[in-house]
Image: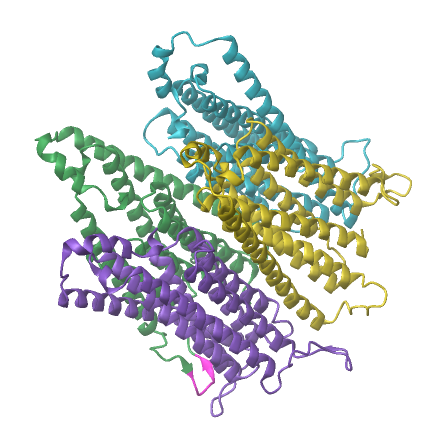
Chain colours: A cyan, B yellow, C green, D purple
Amino acid sequence: MGNFKGHALPGTLFLIVGLWWAGKFSFWYATRRNKGAGRLTSRATQRRLEVIEGSVILSFSMIGMLAEQFAVGGPRLHLYDYASQHWDQLMNWQHATMYLFFGLAGAVSLTVHATEAAPLALDRMMLGIAFFTEGFLFLYHLHGRTMLDVHVHQLLLYAIFGGALTAFLEVFHRGNVLLELLRATLCLLQGSWFWQIGFVLYPPSGLAEWDQKDHNNSMFITMCYCWHFAFALLTVTVVYCTVSWVVRARLKRTPPMEMGLLKTTDKEQESEDEI
Amino acid sequence: MGNFKGHALPGTLFLIVGLWWAGKFSFWYATRRNKGAGRLTSRATQRRLEVIEGSVILSFSMIGMLAEQFAVGGPRLHLYDYASQHWDQLMNWQHATMYLFFGLAGAVSLTVHATEAAPLALDRMMLGIAFFTEGFLFLYHLHGRTMLDVHVHQLLLYAIFGGALTAFLEVFHRGNVLLELLRATLCLLQGSWFWQIGFVLYPPSGLAEWDQKDHNNSMFITMCYCWHFAFALLTVTVVYCTVSWVVRARLKRTPPMEMGLLKTTDKEQESEDEI
Amino acid sequence: MGNFKGHALPGTLFLIVGLWWAGKFSFWYATRRNKGAGRLTSRATQRRLEVIEGSVILSFSMIGMLAEQFAVGGPRLHLYDYASQHWDQLMNWQHATMYLFFGLAGAVSLTVHATEAAPLALDRMMLGIAFFTEGFLFLYHLHGRTMLDVHVHQLLLYAIFGGALTAFLEVFHRGNVLLELLRATLCLLQGSWFWQIGFVLYPPSGLAEWDQKDHNNSMFITMCYCWHFAFALLTVTVVYCTVSWVVRARLKRTPPMEMGLLKTTDKEQESEDEI
Amino acid sequence: MGNFKGHALPGTLFLIVGLWWAGKFSFWYATRRNKGAGRLTSRATQRRLEVIEGSVILSFSMIGMLAEQFAVGGPRLHLYDYASQHWDQLMNWQHATMYLFFGLAGAVSLTVHATEAAPLALDRMMLGIAFFTEGFLFLYHLHGRTMLDVHVHQLLLYAIFGGALTAFLEVFHRGNVLLELLRATLCLLQGSWFWQIGFVLYPPSGLAEWDQKDHNNSMFITMCYCWHFAFALLTVTVVYCTVSWVVRARLKRTPPMEMGLLKTTDKEQESEDEI
């Protein structure tokens, strides 16, 4: 994966997930806050949505694992080359392992919301574990690289471990919209930073190479990371405001038909996260 | 900003903010504790105060950013000098980035208290993020400096990250006066330590230079930091006692006119932080 | 203990404990969730089980301590060899110290559940302390070893300190099934990793030696650790599902005889952890 | 303070405080648990006790500060020797600073319990700050010492920062007997470890010198630290059991005279920590 595409691909995935989370949690928060907004969504719809999200994450992780293994130059499940006494394509195996844990998180989320078998908070814990494992593998991934290469990946760790910590906190503070949006922000940050890493380490033809040992580059990159963070915060804010505005606009247009009838239904329809 | 003024200016700002916070939170705590003190302030006044605070922080941050960019010797929005292939005035850009996040915190605080759009605790989370980003930039700011220079800035990080942690804790324990006053204390500590850094690294003419490599100086500076902390604690205590005394004195002088009438109003006037 | 057996033995013990915990906590969670499942177990049975668990841990720890001291080549309570001015068998003493703290945890668990003398959460705190001490001793255990040796033991520390942190969190969140199963998972991880360490450092005859200085081995081992973690998660999931299924199957077969009679008894039989 | 006495003195103080805390918190827990035990102590007595404890800590800290300054060889408030351009007796100044923060903690505890001016939890926060500052000064205290000297002081930091963390947790979980006894344990550990440091670095005449660079000594010392911890745990257990036994024995001997009369008083007499 030591090329531009290898960083742009996960970057794009994390950007999409971050945007999706920002929208989803903003919408649920808006329906919880606005009385009568319950009719825009029901608990059953929410669960169905979670199940779909889980399935999508699971499928993408499996595709990712298969791609890492069987794409051109992949190890094709060979782990050790006995001839040359060398591990085979360790990088691909590591990336496949990262996908494995995200796949587990997807499967768990699917199970938790499709059945009654497991406690609700398990989806957040497994997501936290998936983020933690990703960071853990990156942490021991950087031996012998150039200074700038190490630095940009270390910065990535802040977003990854930050996401893991946020997910773990959600185990105890489920339904806290601030934590949910912070997670979305950190996911966006991770996504856009993957793109940045691609541009720094494998500049597309036409762009100048970065001097990997210049300390000023390292200083600039640190600051650049903060800008990405500010940008992610801004994106989540825009999504949040749009969603809130749309929900309120819709509620005005479609007045509740029969309040008495809705009263009992409303209660039932409230987000399961609120419990 | 590598001069005395460049440290005295932020130092003064943090000192003012620290004093303001110590006074504000002491006053609110006093009005919450003393029954009938609600008439000294109302919820609407509190919100107006928060909005003003947010605006002031926002304006100062914007002035700070403009000053960093357009003051004599600033980069004037030029980021990269293509002629000499060198980043332009990275220091100024970094300081502008710090101001940016404090500006975001100010804007968020303003929005949270002026409208109903965002959850209440968002102002503390954004403040925590602003402090964290400040510390994060300082952390990667120290490459290649002399021992004492690194050491005084590392000590500063304790106050900054301490402030960030306190603000994050307030997301979950809002209205806890101890956390609020601890934040004020750490802000004062940061302010007075900026002054100390100025005196140590750029001693005003007339004062002796500090030997940057003497380990005894480093030992003394560590102890000196503790004294600044003790001094900040003392300042907050004095402010707290004064405010408490004034509130109680005023309550005695102006007895409630009609208790029955106030009863319902009181309840409404209670601090929103208590909820 | 620098041999294969010396790592396989504690590995096996931790595997057994991890499996036992996974089963125990799954069962209790299942009985708490399924109404009427109280008749499958009673509070008295639970306490008796805890007392037995405490006694078994205590006995095994004492056996371990005696084995470390009096097995062939052990120090036999000699701590310092005055003749050669050298500490005697420090390794054995260190392992005995680890056993000592697990013994204390067992004794405390026994006392807490057999008598009313101590607060309930003490068993988790003491367990956390035992894990912490184990990790603490390993942390200062690694001086002057080869790179791979240090690395595999450092990875072990994640499982150990993770277990300690989980146990400490349970002091405040007792009865949270996610924390309990996470602890079981980390215990299994520790157990299977001990076996892995044995295979890496002391490959049984017939297997190739590992190159202790090859960085690729270190990269592989990190990934391998994640696989052990995934395997431990899978094991706990299987145990959890089996136990849940068995509990539900049994409840169907043996319908409650007299609901009215059971009602009051049920309440009494609920897990003490729920309080 | 680089001598045996300089470590035995604080060690003894911490041992006394640890024992006192173990007794105090065990007694309060016993009176809270045993119904009717309220008559053995009243809320007023508890407050008086806390005030006395605060005063004693305050006085000892002031004596400590004066001793550090004016004892033979002390700096007598001279901070800088302009003649030789050297800081004067930095060690004594550092120790005086440590005493200063414990003095502040004592003064705060006195104020909190003697008046109604400050929030209750402030005493724990200030105690946490005092421990933190002690650890903070030790952390930057170790430059250029021998390996064993650095190591024994680093081990001390675990007890100090552990105590600080426990005290901070008590801000949010006040009255949790486990945290209170853990604090007592860590205080005892600190006390006995100070004695150990004295014996290791300044062995009294007649005892052999320790080889400061032998790694085996360092390994032994780590293990020895765990034994001190086990010993501290044992001591607190013994104190706890004795106090519990005495309280129950006394309650049996002096049966409540008039239950009806006590009922209302009891409620009032309950520990303020419980609120």
C6 and B101: which is toward the camera? B101
**In the figure, residue A201 lies in which quadrant?**
top right
Q: Position of residue A267 (x, y in %)?
A: 36, 21
Q: In the figure, B124 relative to B191: above or below?
A: above
- The residue at the far right in this view is B83
Taking the image as shown, residue D155 lies to the left or right of residue B15, namely left
How many marks can you see? 0
D166 and B214: which is toward the camera? D166
Taking the image as shown, residue D244 lies to the left or right of residue B95, namely left
C173 and C200: which is toward the camera? C173
Tell me where the magenta segment starts and ends, as one range. Answer: C81-87
Q: Residue at x 62, y 75 (%)?
A: D93
Q: Position of residue B153 (x, y in %)?
A: 70, 57
- The residue at the far bottom in this view is D206
The answer to whether residue C5 shows anywhere in this view is no
The answer to whether residue B23 shows anywhere in this view is yes
Taking the image as shown, residue D202 lies to the left or right of residue B54, namely left
Q: Is residue C83 magenta?
A: yes
Q: Is residue D45 magenta?
A: no
Q: Position of residue A248 (x, y in %)?
A: 53, 16
Taking the image as shown, residue D184 lies to the left or right of residue D206, namely left
Q: Position of residue A86 (x, y in %)?
A: 58, 47
B144 and A147: which is toward the camera? B144
Q: In the figure, A118 relative to A267: above or below?
A: below
The quadrant of the image that shows the N terminus of chain D is: bottom right
